[in-house]
Image (cartoon, rainbow, N blue to C red):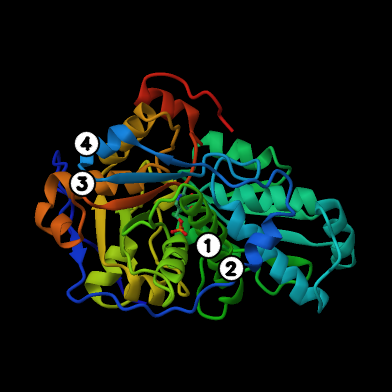
């Protein structure tokens, strides 16, 4: 795969150098996803739909009719949305190993009994925080071991929360992509099951299930908007690391039976691998340290299974600097939400479009009639940074 560097953000400037708006309208293409993941998630401990909130301060600031924030700061007992993808992917992988669905089971204790014949088993993955903690929690629930690889710049708070689930954490010298490569070396080893949210040649089934697993979020949104007698969004803004979550957004919102929406992807300017790939016209690995404060988005290569979906489905893609993420964290806090650096990045992308890209915002229909949806994909997963940025400690540090 080609490796390229992207244009630098000029030192001291808050204006990103890079923004991609699709030349032609996006056609609906994907199949309507089924609801099996949500039926599965309902049986996990603590399942409850997360809140869909209006953000009046942000609405005023952006001048849009509605700004909905799907608040994933508490999901299945963890402070991020990632459990949805990890749990469904693991479940399907266990079914494949057993050769059948382990029905009937009502709760994780029942599921643990049903998958006991697969013991001893160690779950392995790479992470920059949230996915690894989810995999570690799943291992604890089901009585498996867990070995989680993290890049060298991972902050202590995130490592400790993964270790707190009983997993062993190994720090890999290098970037998130290096940690992914290390975890991939274990794929196929006896007694090991790699649960990666990113895909590479020869390893695609589990990451495809991760993308499916996130559909629970959109089904909940759909249900809540119907209950409130509100219309579906016409613009959806989603933050991207390897692009698996954005691929899930595309799969849901561009399904033929649903009203068309414009989907906008947002990445840190120092880890804009999807944007770089869109500009290059091919999936590429970008050069550089991927050292943004948006830790969950510090990825150098789009997922192989996400790439075709985000390539075809994104109407636009924007890169933001760390200060934009901080600004979005403060704005969400003003609207009563506690969102981490990666969690607030979607709103950060909207602020960036609003302030520096009026023509493109217009083209995307982000105006006074717009119904916009963003995702706060995590809570304050690094409480010290959140306190520093917002000026008070978070209420619930997850
Ligand atoms: C909080 C948060 N938001 C968004 C993302 C991006 O998801 P993806 O890597 O599927 O693009 C991540 C990934 O780890 C994350 O932790």
Ligand 1 closer than 8 Å to the CB at disc 4?
A: no
- Gap in angstroms between the C-alphas marked 2 and 1: 6 Å
- Gap in angstroms between the C-alphas marked 3 and 2: 36 Å
Q: Which is more N-terminal, label 2 or label 4? A: 4
Residue at 75%, 76% (x, y): give it: 96
> Mark 4 or mark 2, which is nearer to you?
4
- In the rendered image, the residue lying farthest to the top is 392
For disc 4, the neighbor class at 10 Å (few under 14, some 14 to 19, many from 20) is few
- Gap in angstroms between the C-alphas marked 1 and 4: 39 Å
As drawn, the label of residue 180 is 1
- In the rendered image, the residue lying farthest to the front is 229
Secondary structure at badge 2 equals: helix
Secondary structure at badge 1 equals: helix
Q: Are marks 2 and 1 in contact (CB under 8 Å)?
A: yes
* Residue that label 2 marks: 184
Q: Is residue 262 above or below residue 164?
A: below
Residue at 81%, 77% (x, y): give it: 100
* Residue that label 3 marks: 352
For disc 1, the neighbor class at 10 Å (few under 14, some 14 to 19, many from 20) is many
For disc 2, the neighbor class at 10 Å (few under 14, some 14 to 19, many from 20) is some
Res. 119 in view = no
Residue at 31%, 68% (x, y): give it: 314
> Mark 3 or mark 4, which is nearer to you?
4
User: What quarter of the picture does the C terminus occupy?
Assistant: top right
| Left or right of 83, for residue 167 | right
Ligand 1 closer than 8 Å to the CB at disc 2?
A: no
As drawn, the label of residue 247 is none
As drawn, the label of residue 61 is 4
- Gap in angstroms between the C-alphas marked 1 and 3: 30 Å
- Gap in angstroms between the C-alphas marked 4 and 2: 44 Å
> Mark 1 or mark 3, which is nearer to you?
3
């Amino acid at each position: 795969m080609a490796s390229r560097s992207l244009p630098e953000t000029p030192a001291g400037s808050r204006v990103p150098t890079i923004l991609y708006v699709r030349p032609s309208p996006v056609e609906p293409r994907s199949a309507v996803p089924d609801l099996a993941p949500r039926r599965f998630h309902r049986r996990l401990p603590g399942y409850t739909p997360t809140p869909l909130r209006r953000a009046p301060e942000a609405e005023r600031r952006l001048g849009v009719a509605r700004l909905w924030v799907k608040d994933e700061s508490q999901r299945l007992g963890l402070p991020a949305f990632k459990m949805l993808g990890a749990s469904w992917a693991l479940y399907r992988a266990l079914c494949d190993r057993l050769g059948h669905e382990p029905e009937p089971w009502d709760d994780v204790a029942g599921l643990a009994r049903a998958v006991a014949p697969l013991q001893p088993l160690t779950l392995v993955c790479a992470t920059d925080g949230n996915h690894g903690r989810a995999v570690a929690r799943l291992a604890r629930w089901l009585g498996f071991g867990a070995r989680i690889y993290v890049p060298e710049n991972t902050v202590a708070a995130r490592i400790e929360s993964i270790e707190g689930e009983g997993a062993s954490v190994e720090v890999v010298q290098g970037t998130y992509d290096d940690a992914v490569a290390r975890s991939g070396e274990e794929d196929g080893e006896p007694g090991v099951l790699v649960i990666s949210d990113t895909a590479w040649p020869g390893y695609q089934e589990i990451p495809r299930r991760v993308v499916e697993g996130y559909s629970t979020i959109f089904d909940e949104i759909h249900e809540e908007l119907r209950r409130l007698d509100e219309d579906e969004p016409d613009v959806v803004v989603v933050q991207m690391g390897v692009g698996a979550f954005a691929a899930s957004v595309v799969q849901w919102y561009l399904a033929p039976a649903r009203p068309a929406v414009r989907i906008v992807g947002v990445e840190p300017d120092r880890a804009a691998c999807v944007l770089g790939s869109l500009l290059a016209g091919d999936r590429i690995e970008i050069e550089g340290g991927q050292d943004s404060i948006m830790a969950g988005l510090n990825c150098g290569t789009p997922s192989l299974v996400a790439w075709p979906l985000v390539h075809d489905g994104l109407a636009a893609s924007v890169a933001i600097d760390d200060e934009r993420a901080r600004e979005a964290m403060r704005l969400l806090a003003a609207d009563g939400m506690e969102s981490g650096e990666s969690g607030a990045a979607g709103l950060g992308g909207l602020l960036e479009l609003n302030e520096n890209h009026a023509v493109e915002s217009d083209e995307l229909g982000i105006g006074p009639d717009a119904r916009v949806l963003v995702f706060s994909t995590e809570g304050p997963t690094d409480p010290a940074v959140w306190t520093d940025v917002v000026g008070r400690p978070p209420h619930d540090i997850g």
